[in-house]
Image: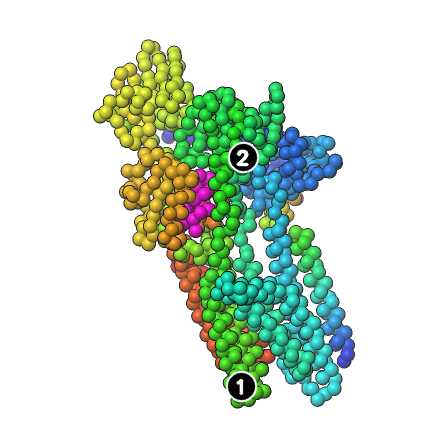
Amino acid sequence: MPEVQEAVLCHHCGEECKNEDLIIEDKHFCCVGCKTVFELLQENDLCGYYDLEQHAGVSLKSKNHEGKFDYLQNPDIEAAILDFKSEKLHKVTLFLPAVHCSSCVWLLENFHKIRAGVLHSRLNFIKKELSLTYDPTNVSLKEIVELLATLGYEPLISLENTVAKDQTRTKKSNRLLRQIAVTGFCTGNIMLLSFPEYFKLDLQNDVDAQYQKFFLYLNVILALPVYFYGAADYIKGAWVSLKEVWKRNTTTLSVDIPIALGVTALFIRSLYETLINGAGAYWDSMAGLVFLLLLGKWVQKKTFDYLSFERNYKSYFPLAVEVKNKDHFDYKNVDDLRKGDIIRIHNNELIPADAQLADGKAFIDYSFVTGESEPVSIRNNEVIYAGGRQKGQNIELVVTKEVSKSYLTQLWNQANFKEEKEVANTKLADDFSKYFTYITLAISFLTAIYWAVVNPETAWPAFTAVLMVACPCALTLSMPFTMGTVMGIFGKNKFYVKNQNVIQKLTEIKHIVFDKTGTLTKNNDYRELTYKGESLSEKEQSLFKSLALNSTHPVSKLVASHFDKSEELIFDEISEMEGAGILGYIDSQKVQIGNAHFLGVPQHQLDKEARVYLKIGDTVKGCLKTRPVFREGFEGVIAKLKNSFNLYLLSGDKSTDKAQLSEYLAEDHLHFEQKPEDKLHFIKTLQDSKEPVLMVGDGLNDAGALRQSDLGIALSENTQAFTPASDAILDANKFSELSNFIEFSRKSVNIVKLSFLLSLVYNFICISWAVSGTLSPVVAAIFMPLSSISVVLFAVIITYFSARKSNLLT
Amino acid sequence: MSIIILLVIAALIFAGGFLAAFFWATDDGQFDDTATPAIRILNDDTVEKSKS
């Protein structure tokens, strides 16, 4: 029987122990990092970490953060990050993207046991934020952050953190919650206190009459906060809209107007009934109405608040950078960088501002900015743009522009980036209410005139009754509840939309623009490699591998990985020509890897898709081709979308993959070598036709286009990781569902329209009662909330039903 | 019978107390994070066990 070797899994992170296998007691570890964490936890008696969840740790392979957090020693930068600062106590909130399970919560909340000086730690699991309180005399922020990084929870500290934390949103939602609470409280009590009235107190009886008065006046008191606090926003909104119409800025009446009209009519009529007639009134109808409306508003505002849709370049840039100060380097907040400052950039660090190379060998990866994956080498005094990432040794640069004026950041300073995208908030409802208001007013006045002639006594009650029941309550409720349900369904399918408007926008799309790398195809690390040429012997393969290993260039790495299984040889002499290739001698045999020009590849061997050529002695053996690996389901989605939309592709890459892509998309819709700015302008030109454009992208280089488009969807392998500012975030694995999402959002808008129709039927019934002047308070109290609730239920149930049919729910 | 009036007022004040409690809870941030406490409650005991 052949021996089956079971893979040894790391006790800490659960990855296979491939290259290393470190053993403590009977536990295996895949790398020094994992082992260190285990030892640290063992020392502090925190091994319960592994009991909660097996292999709970984060893989620590190839993570080195030495010196990375030195900038936290700078008091100015520290102060910018801290939430609270006193002599004996510091408070800080850190974002830890690696948080993923209950073990994380347990370990991080026991952080004070690992490091003395930490007084208290609390984790928000959903937001992945760790709030720490510590004693600065005992432990420094840098030490804490370094320890977190050692444990595998490296905090992401970026410029965005230093911008004063935005508290207004929570305050706003708190105000709405308060309104709901107050209105709910009053509504419940008013309903209860209205019962005696409905059950006909005997008014001839002195005692009963006294009680009736008491209940009525109590209702008035309870209704005051409902009208003046609960409904305040509707009344204000209506007032603003009226003023706009008066000034002739617009002709559309907002949906607030009929609502405010209805609520006000209910309020005044009820006041009149109670104070003048001393009879039962519509207090409970009014309170219930406002309560339901506020609930609808709350549902509408619910978002995935643990996802950020508003990230700009600041989230990507480092917080601080080393700046030369006479003869040594100090850390400085990148916001304070000035023209002429000399900065030092380490391997893999992002360049925060446009700068000129002063010293060192610069090898810049611009994939972040342009999407072009191949790093470029820069000569002295050449300009390096912000957003580039240095690969290799340390370099020194002279800043030529401040951070906010750099080429990349300029994109964000464009006028259209500052203002929010046009809010089509209640567009559908607004369209409806445009006519709704006028029709309601017309009917109520006609009723009043009719009764004034026939029976003047009925004129006033009939007039107010029409205004009361015509309030588009069900209308305004069905929209938020339906869209809220759709949002939840999308969320379950890992398609997170920013707000409800996005769903509606999705139905109006005419053009769809895709980014290539990372969007249609998987990231560059996943490119498929194929060799073309004469077959290579074992020896030749190891020659190429060994030579390639001597270079840090990504293409060399590709070559090395392709011949991964080959033996490694030592070359006698190696020289690398930047941007051309690498050349080596072994046993006086010449081996070359590089571009066509460097190798002098003859015409007939040239290949358009070739990435790199291989040559031994004088013969060109062949070339390596790379093909992008498309996302799963890519073909299906494109085929489906093709029927109803114009599809385009924008790529920052060279046109190497053009042939392959033109199988799927029209060739003149493929655009290569597009800079971020070009992408933005392309979207703009498409929009000139007034047809909405959907942009699907993934990187910062698409950020401009995402923002410019009518609807920007950011694709992400990990939705918790950084995504550029967008209207929706889509999990990359769900890319194949994109057409389904668009389809379903269409259905949902139809459902809303259907429920509008239903609520119109209700309104019609109500108005016929109102016109005839026979709407009693009891009927109003039952019928009005019932109609709203039934419309909402109808919409939500149908939405769930059709989601199941579209396979979005199981 | 006038006791009813007293009762109604007392009930209102009582319910108002809950309203105030709700206000306090929202301002205190008790609804800010509804996910972590659910995990946290499961964790605490194991700490003590491994300590002893």
Q: Is residue A331 magenta?
A: no
Q: Quadrant of the C terminus of chain A?
A: bottom left
- A702 or A207: nearer the viewer: A702
Question: Would you say A476 lies left or right of A236 here?
Answer: left
| Spot occupied by residue B11 in the image (x, y as percentages of width and height) | 72, 69
Residue shown at 36% from the left, 21% from the top: A581
Chain containing mark 2: A
Please identify the quarter of the rendering in which residue A530 is found.
Answer: top left
- Identify the residue at the far top of this view: A588
Q: Are marks 2 and 1 on the same chain?
A: yes
Q: How is the image coloured?
A: rainbow
| Spot occupied by residue A641 in the image (x, y as percentages of width and height) | 34, 51
Mark 1: amino acid: Trp
- A360 or A442: nearer the viewer: A442
Mark 2: amino acid: Val
Q: For the residue carrying disc 2, how many other residues have a C-alpha within 10 Å: few (<14), some (14-19), or many (20+)? A: many
* SS of the residue under disc 1: helix
Image: B25 above or below A270: above
Q: Which residues, given as a range, are shown in magenta?
A: A693-710
Image: A120 above or below A445: above
- A95 or A390: nearer the viewer: A390
Residue shown at 63% from the left, 53% from the top: A171
Image: A70 above or below A730: above
Residue A451, numbered circle: 1
| Spot occupied by residue A643 in the image (x, y as percentages of width and height) | 31, 53
Q: For the residue carrying disc 1, how many other residues have a C-alpha within 10 Å: few (<14), some (14-19), or many (20+)? A: many
Image: A340 above or below A95: above
Question: Would you say A739 lies left or right of A69 here?
Answer: left
Please identify the quarter of the rendering in which residue A56 is found.
Answer: top right
- List the residue tagged with mark 2: A403
Whether residue A551 can be seen here: yes
